[in-house]
């Protein structure tokens, strides 16, 4: 929707009869978790104060939106109708913004977005590369609407799909539409959504359940949180459509307790939907009854697995159970249950309202629609990215992400969190979809993309993920419980320079055994980071075990810190931060580093910044 | 299947929200109310990382060690806590001022590395800013009069 259209929609209905008012200015502050932690509510309060001071509070609407996905540049403030995009705003800047747009001043240039490489100033939202190359279907409303006002969701065709379904479609037709669209589950494995729905729809019995899986446990992924915070109604509408399609009367949203803001916004959305007749008895005048309850998870990664999630709602330890029977046949309280991810459900309303053909025209042959990624790590623009399935990684990293900062070079990209794998540079042109990633030994997972540069050690990353999996393993089946522990131990040996070549073979064998023998998805995919690391970055493992070196200079035990006398200016910064007093020396003289006292904490390395002149004075040697 | 069991986790969450941690008394109360054995409730509670069984410190520090924060050096903050305050994961200092937790991911990856102090998120931290943050929470004795009573004064 263009900026003009949007302005039109927010003009009061009766305005035509009165004198045509000047275009209404809207100043929208982002209040997603990222921006809130950088004090965006204070910015909004300050803006409101200045608007009053300038006597302009009638001419302006100061509101807030959910996450724009460009969290790294937060807090973000957007001014409409021009569509000016301010980033890294602090409460102190509120006055300048208010004067600029309400007091007849010039837009505040210093807060404009700058291209990370060309340093070019980009004042308008629509011109920013990060957004330009994206196609937003699932994130269609994120950053555009106030998530706590149902009217803004309705103004963007919200609940139209539900109205269409309950008034003019049979449940079987809804399932058929989703099947034709080729929607695959966005939770990671990419199972065909319509098959799950159809199995459940055909089960006998009146009591069925639907669950929205918002237990986004993958470290490095935050899209589900952002969607729930920015556009909870679209998920709710999707869940209600699912309820209608399979004939369920009750839905749950299982949300991580680590996401308090998301839980709050979902609860607000629930209350509003009930008030407006989208939930409850006889929805929109039909004979369909449906209601939703929020269940807060209690912090267990394994609860993202559907049978474990069901166990958790039933009040047990969140341990997976053997499938079959699948939840679609026998799930929550023993009744047929469909569990879908947040992104899957957010796609459903668009499919129903715009039609399956439209949706199926996006993406690749086997993976339809769009994919949402959380792009983080060593990347210039980090945030939420939505691209059509089949877009190459290079588009995401270089065009949208703006490349690797600090003049470092690309080394690997980790896709799919702890269930995925590390992919090297020569796979960057590969079209990304469910199947191509699987072939490369990784998986879509929940969509975390962590970019790594040459300072990141692959062995360390493999160790990191496996340690995470090991501590999150529920302990029910032996391959996962014992196998991952041994894998961590072997990786620890390699990381500290005690490994042998035999360990590499052992690690690989063990990884395959855990993959084949584990009960649930957690264990079956746990070895992926290790297996892909060994497949694409074997040389780095060999350097650790044979040469006892860490090429990235990241593994502590294999690194020594040195001061280069020619470069040291004697500024004493490192002396101040050294926790063990290993660095000594008077001001303006070359400092001395006592290796016997050094604990390799990197504090001196991080604070020593003379690269502009002659490179860092403190270096890591491996 | 005991349908009452479904209230175990919400009740434990409420108990922790009210008391800061899960006390043996809280477990007993829940056990009586739901007619589920204390053992079973302990079993559920210990499975989930959210629940703590010791009171938190005055300043509860959560260090995020998700992927983005790990790549950005989140481990450094655990180390600073170990060296400066002699605290590890799940521990509370003897004077009750600080407690430390390691968390998997807070979903603020674009702000990595992230530290949460008393529910307030601090993003883009480094060793130096983290040390300053700790100092602001617990000023050295000279500045303690007045400022110490207001933990938010420096933030």
Image (cartoon, coloured by chain):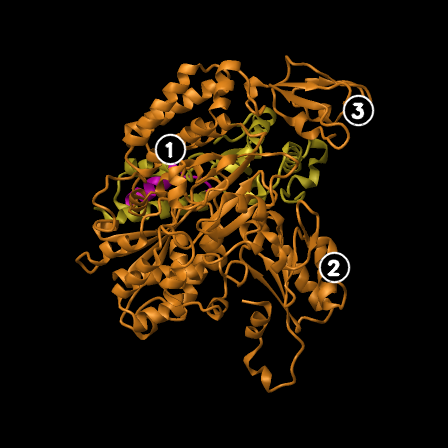
Please determine whether, in this image, residue B77 is positioned above or below residue A324: above
Q: In front: mark 2 or mark 3?
A: 3
Percent across and percent down for residue A28 are: 61, 62
- For disc 2, the neighbor class at 10 Å (few under 14, some 14 to 19, many from 20) is some
Please determine whether, in this image, residue B63 is positioned above or below residue A47: above
Please determine whether, in this image, residue A525 is positioned above or below residue A534: below
Choose between A482 and A615: the one closer to the eye: A615
Quadrant containing the C terminus of chain A in the rendered view: top right
Chain ID at mark 2: A
Marking on residue A526: 1
Q: Which residues are magenta?
A: B20-32
Identify the residue under disc 3: A569
Q: Residue at x 32, y 57 (%)?
A: A251
Q: Residue at x 36, y 71 (%)?
A: A163
Identify the residue under disc 2: A96
Q: Are marks 2 and 3 in contact (CB under 8 Å)?
A: no
């Amino acid at each position: 929707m263009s900026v003009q259209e949007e302005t039109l929609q927010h003009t009061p209905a009766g305005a035509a009869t009165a004198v045509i008012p000047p275009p209404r200015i809207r100043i929208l502050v982002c209040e997603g978790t990222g921006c809130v932690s950088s004090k965006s509510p204070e910015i909004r309060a300050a803006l409101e104060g200045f608007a009053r001071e300038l006597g302009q509070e009638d001419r302006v609407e100061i509101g807030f939106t959910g996450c724009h996905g460009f969290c790294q540049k937060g807090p973000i403030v957007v001014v409409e109708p021009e569509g000016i995009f301010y980033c890294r705003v602090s409460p102190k800047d509120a006055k300048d913004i208010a004067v600029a747009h309400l007091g007849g001043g010039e837009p505040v240039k210093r807060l404009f977005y700058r291209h990370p490489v060309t340093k070019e100033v980009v004042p308008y939202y629509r011109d920013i590369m990060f957004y330009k190359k994206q196609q937003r279907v699932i994130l269609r409303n994120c950053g555009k609407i106030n998530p706590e006002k149902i009217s803004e969701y309705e103004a963007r065709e919200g609940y139209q799909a539900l109205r269409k379904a309950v008034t003019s479609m049979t449940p079987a037709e809804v399932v058929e539409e989703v099947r034709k669209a080729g929607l695959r589950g966005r939770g990671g494995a990419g199972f065909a959504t319509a098959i799950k729905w159809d199995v459940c729809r055909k089960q006998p019995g009146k009591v069925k359940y639907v669950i929205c899986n918002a237990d986004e446990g993958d470290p490095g992924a935050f899209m589900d949180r952002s969607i729930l915070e920015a556009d909870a109604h679209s998920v709710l509408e999707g869940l209600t459509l699912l309820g209608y399609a399979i004939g369920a009367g009750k839905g749950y949203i299982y949300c991580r307790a680590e996401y308090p803001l998301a839980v709050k916004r979902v609860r607000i959305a629930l209350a509003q939907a009930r008030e407006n007749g989208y939930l409850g008895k006889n929805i929109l005048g039909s004979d369909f009854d449906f209601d939703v309850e929020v269940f807060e998870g209690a912090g267990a990664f394994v609860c993202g697995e559907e049978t474990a999630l069901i166990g958790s709602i039933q009040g047990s330890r969140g341990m997976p159970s053997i499938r079959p029977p699948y939840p679609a046949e026998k799930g929550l309280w023993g009744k047929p249950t469909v569990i879908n991810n947040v992104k899957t459900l957010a796609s459903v309303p668009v499919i129903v309202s715009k039609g399956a053909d439209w949706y199926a025209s996006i993406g690749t042959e086997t993976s339809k629609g769009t994919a949402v990624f959380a792009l983080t790590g060593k990347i210039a623009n980090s945030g939420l990215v939505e691209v059509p399935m089949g877009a190459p990684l290079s588009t995401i990293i270089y065009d949208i992400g703006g490349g690797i900062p600090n003049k470092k070079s690309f080394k690997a990209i980790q896709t799919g969190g702890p269930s995925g794998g590390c992919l090297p540079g020569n796979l960057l042109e590969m079209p990304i979809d469910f199947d191509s990633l699987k072939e490369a030994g990784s998986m879509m997972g929940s969509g975390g993309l962590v970019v790594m540069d040459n300072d990141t050690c692959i062995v360390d990353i493999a160790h990191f993920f496996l340690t995470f999996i090991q501590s999150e393993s529920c302990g029910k089946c032996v391959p996962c419980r014992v196998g991952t522990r041994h894998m961590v131990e072997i990786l620890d040996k390699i990381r500290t320079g005690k490994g042998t070549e035999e360990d590499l073979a052992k690690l690989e064998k063990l990884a395959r055994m855990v993959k084949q023998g584990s009960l649930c998805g957690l264990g079956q995919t746990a070895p992926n980071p290790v297996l892909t690391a060994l497949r694409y970055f074997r040389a780095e493992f060999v350097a650790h075990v044979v040469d006892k070196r860490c090429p990235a200079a990241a593994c502590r035990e294999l690194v020594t810190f040195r001061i280069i006398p020619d470069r040291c200016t004697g500024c004493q910064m490192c002396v101040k931060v050294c926790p063990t007093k290993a660095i000594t020396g008077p001001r303006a003289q070359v400092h001395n580093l006592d290796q016997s006292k050094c604990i390799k904490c990197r504090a001196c390395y991080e604070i020593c910044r003379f690269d502009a002149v002659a490179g860092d004075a403190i270096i890591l040697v491996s | 299947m005991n349908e009452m069991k479904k209230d175990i986790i919400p009740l434990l969450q409420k108990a922790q929200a009210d008391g800061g941690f899960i006390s043996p008394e809280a477990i007993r109360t829940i056990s009586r109310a739901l007619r589920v054995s204390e053992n079973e409730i302990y079993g559920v509670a210990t499975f989930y990382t959210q629940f703590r069984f010791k009171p938190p410190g005055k300043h509860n520090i959560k260090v995020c060690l998700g992927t983005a924060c790990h790549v950005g050096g989140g481990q450094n903050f655990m180390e600073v806590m170990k060296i400066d305050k002699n605290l590890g994961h799940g521990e509370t200092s003897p004077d009750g001022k600080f407690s430390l937790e390691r968390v998997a991911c807070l979903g603020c990856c674009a702000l990595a590395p992230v530290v949460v102090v008393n529910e307030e998120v601090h993003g883009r931290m480094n060793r130096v800013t983290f040390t300053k943050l700790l100092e602001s929470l617990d000023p050295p004795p000279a500045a303690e009069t007045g400022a110490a009573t207001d933990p938010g004064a420096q933030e």
